[in-house]
Image (cartoon, grey):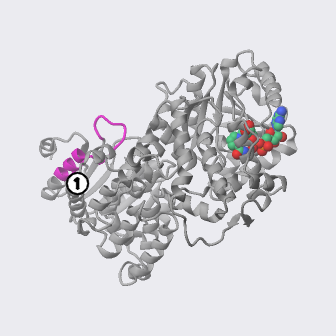
Amino acid sequence: MTNSIEELNLQNWHLERDAQQIAWLSLDCANSSTNTLSSAVIIELARVINALEKNRPSALIIHSGKDAGFIAGADIEEFTKLSDGSAVRVLVQRCWDLFNRIAGLPFPTLALIRGHCMGGGLELALACRYRIAVDEPATRMALPEVMLGIVPGWGGMLRLPRLIGPAAALDMMLTGKQIDAKRGKKMGLVDECVPPRVMKNAARMLVLSGQAAHKLSLMQTLLCGPLKAIVANAARKQVAGKASPEHYPAPYAVIDTWKNFGGNSLAVPAGHPSSFEYILQQGTAANLVRVFFLQQRLKALGKSENPSDFAPRHVHVIGAGTMGGDIAAWCVLRGMTVSLQDQTTERIAPAIGRAAEAFSKKFRGDRKAARFALDRLIADPRGDGVRQADVIIEAIFENLDAKHALFQDIESRARPDALLASNTSSLKLEDIAQALKRPDRLVGIHFFNPVAMMPLVEVVAGQSSDPAQVQRAISFVHKLDKLPLPVKSAPGFLVNAVLGPYLLEAMRCVEEGISAATVDAAASRFGMPMGPIELADTVGLDIAMAAGKALTGSDDAPPQLLALVSAGKLGKKSGAGYYTWLEGKAIKARVYDIPEGLTQRLIKPLLTATQRCIAVGVVDDPDLADAGIIFGTGFSPWTGGPMNYMAQKGNPA
Ligand code: NAI
């Protein structure tokens, strides 16, 4: 065996047989911290399978040789270099055939999954007879291809529905949702969920157990066969509410390929809307891959060369309102200890209550874990935490005098190396910094509402901010698992500066007599996650008006907005605004017709504002603008961002 392994000349895989003749095949991709299924890795795997077919082991166990995880998926960089549909077809055919061979091996096979197991990695695991997931927070399994505008073509669409039932499988494939080890066991995605210390033994025992592979119930088998149409129709309905086939063909292709082509995308004829050729030529996939790389770029900004540089453990948040309370809870969930200050204990209590609820949801009833988290959130009305904190975040009322007084007090008590930050939306960072003896210490860390949902955080450099402090803030945001966007101090920074003109144009349309629901439908048709009028109602019309004033420096506002605010109709929070709100939902009239050109009219001010922000240097380059606007506003990801959209389609006249 030794010779044959050497003859295989493996760079990425490592193969060895133990005393029981089990072949242990570990993936440790050369020159990379992450395992991906590049062409080179697949070609080597095919060589290994050839060798094992010739010289059969008692069983095969595939695992990772890296601490970082099992397999992150296909090599996306390589994928982007494939020029056309036929090149993709060759790649898909190679993996489809290989995984079918693995599924048909005459000896038992098992994937031992520890850490992330995504896309092609999960498709490889699905081709094995058994799967064991190691019960650790890092273990996550998903088929997230649709998020890149493509489909799981290496057998995922064939095997996942047969393993866990079609409804659950389509749900995973259409949302890209990540499944942890315990949940994976519950839904039948894995056969066992085990702690790390016993994982190898468990794998050895299961693979030699002779246990039958997991089988579907009769009902699920029917839903995979003669009753397919029921599941497919329900899934189509679910997708139609979220994404149009015009902008997002991939989810529709998943349903169609499963229902009509046996889960085999190679069986879909070129030119069919579910085919590779159509999906690639349509353009969304390339733009979504671009969005993926933009996300990687923002993440990379926060990765310090030397991780020991800045490792904040204690955060002190001042202001336990909407933002401060939720920022504090988020920091706790990311493992930090947080002292939360406000004027009185009574003002802190609601934030702690909200956090307790969020923790219990997050830990799904694991009371101990939720309790441990809550123990790290300390109500601190006197602000004693200022003295120990590594990071101090101010999130009090938007009032300059109050912020001045507060920062003078903070500076006198904080550690000299503590990072000082303001969450202000509309005050000038330079004006706030005036209160400090060392204004260079202050940076902006601008979270968005709701904190738990919004992936982006703007890190604001004022004129006097020390670049080293800005970098520490970026690193802190990264440690919070948020995407840091470096911006210059300017009214509205990037995100609000582009949202403002867009919301204003939408309100003008309403003033002209177009119904709010029609305006929102026009934006939704473009793929915006929420229409601009509904967004204004959700943010609060008083806040929207104040933000508009801060942006333009003028008291002028659309008359209807002024009237609503002075009547106390502030939107969702007061039950009425542009819409009437019932149980947290806007009551919208049915829209039969969207006027020609309305969508472009709404989008244009946002595009123009983006160009302006780049021109005045709010962000360093167009890619950062696109990244910030997609992750900060949800701007239609299929476009690849406003700048990319203009590069492809031009700025609408
Ligand atoms: P909020 O009104 O909900 O909460 C402010 C809290 O600060 C109150 O609980 C108040 O008692 C407390 N406070 C005021 N002065 C204080 C002091 N001297 N010491 C201790 N606590 C004090 O306000 P919200 O909405 O949370 O906004 C806070 C900051 O975050 C503002 O600067 C705002 O511009 C910014 N922001 C707000 C967003 C939003 O959507 N609400 C989004 C992003 C930033």
Examine the rendering and report whether any part of residue 417 can be seen.
no
Q: For mark 1, what is the residue?
A: 91
Q: Residue at x 34, y 69 (%)?
A: 211
Q: Position of residue 542 (x, y in %)?
A: 77, 48
Left or right: 530 in relation to 88: right
Which residues lie in the magenta part? 29-48
The outermost residue toward the top is 437
Q: Nearer the viewer, residue 217 or 455?
A: 455
Tell me: residue 624, above or below residue 650. above
Q: Is residue 37 magenta?
A: yes
The residue under the point 38% across, 74% down is 215
User: Image quarter for residue 341?
Assistant: top right
Question: Residue 560 at x, y = what percent?
Answer: 75, 55
- In the rendered view, does 617 fall on the left or right side of 554? left
Element at badge 1? helix
* Residue count near mark 1 (Cα–Cα under 10 Å), binned few <14, some 14–19, many ≥20: some
- State whether residue 390 appears in this view: yes
Nearer-the-camera pick, 452 or 88: 88
Is residue 519 highlighted in magenta? no
Q: Quadrant of ligand 1?
A: top right
| Picture coordinates of residue 157, whole percent (x, y) | 34, 66
- In the image, what residue type sits under mark 1? Leu
In the rendered view, would you say 456 is above or below 191?
A: above
User: What residue do we see at 70% from left, 42% from top?
Assistant: 548
